[in-house]
Image (cartoon, grey):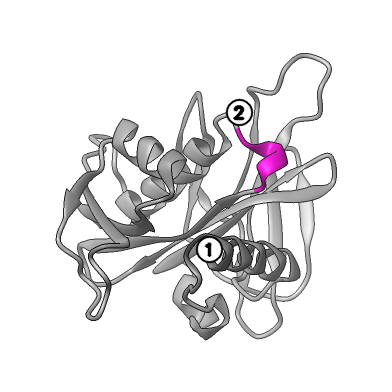
Amino acid sequence: MAELLGSRPDIGPIASGVSFARGATEASNLSITTRPGRGTISHVTNLSSAPAGSAPTRLSAVPYDHPDAHHLTRALHLDQVATYGFAEDPGETPAAQFDPPQGLFLIAHHDGGAVGCGGIRLLDAETAEIKRMYVKESARGNGLGRRILEYLERHAAVNGATQLLLETGFRNHDALALYQRCGYTPRSSYVPGRDPRVNRALTKRLGFPDRRVS
């Protein structure tokens, strides 16, 4: 079982020591989603900010090639193609890049459906990249994107990262506003061949004083 690294009131328990294995279970605010051949993944928190009487949003870690992850990343891809006329194919990213502890891929579930996602992968010992951030239109406006982002940031920090990188497009106004509120600042593109008229690369320095790696 993963060691808890403490909690934050807006995110909940943070787990470390995550790996992948066969089987699945769920208890209280911890769930384990698994994939044959790649060990056990055990990260989850119930986001407790749902209005009284409404169903809570559950945030869980899954393999990148999980069906819910595939569904949401394809929806993201279609949205990007509709906006820009082109987009990076999420299926070209190796699923193992999001395996803990070097990576993590999160799915948000609400009322039994997958409504949001986001991932992180380590590029080197101190640098991590946020990828595939997406919230369905029906679930936007409730701070879900920020909660996913903050959980990913925490995972990166407890695994040694001190710098975050991410990319988005110039027409993704809501995403750009979110990243600015969360402390991200513009930088030059870190991926060769990006169109500077479209691409917006951002960075953030991490600093969690209670960081502890198991």
- Residue at 34% in and 51% down: 158
- Residue at 53% in and 79% down: 89
Q: Could you say which is closer to the camera, residue 85 or residue 45?
A: 85
Residue 129, image x, y percentages? 33, 62
Residue 19, image x, y percentages? 54, 69
Residue 32, image x, y percentages? 69, 58
Q: Could you say which is closer to the camera, residue 141 or residue 154?
A: 141
Few, some or many residues within 10 Å of mark 1 (<14, 14–19, 20+): some
* Label drawn at residue 142: 2
Q: Is residue 120 magenta?
A: no
On screen, 85 above or below 182? below
- Residue at 28% in and 72% down: 123
Left or right placement of residue 138 versus residue 119 in this view: right
Q: Amino acid at mark 2?
A: Asn
* Label drawn at residue 80: 1
On screen, 196 above or below 88? above
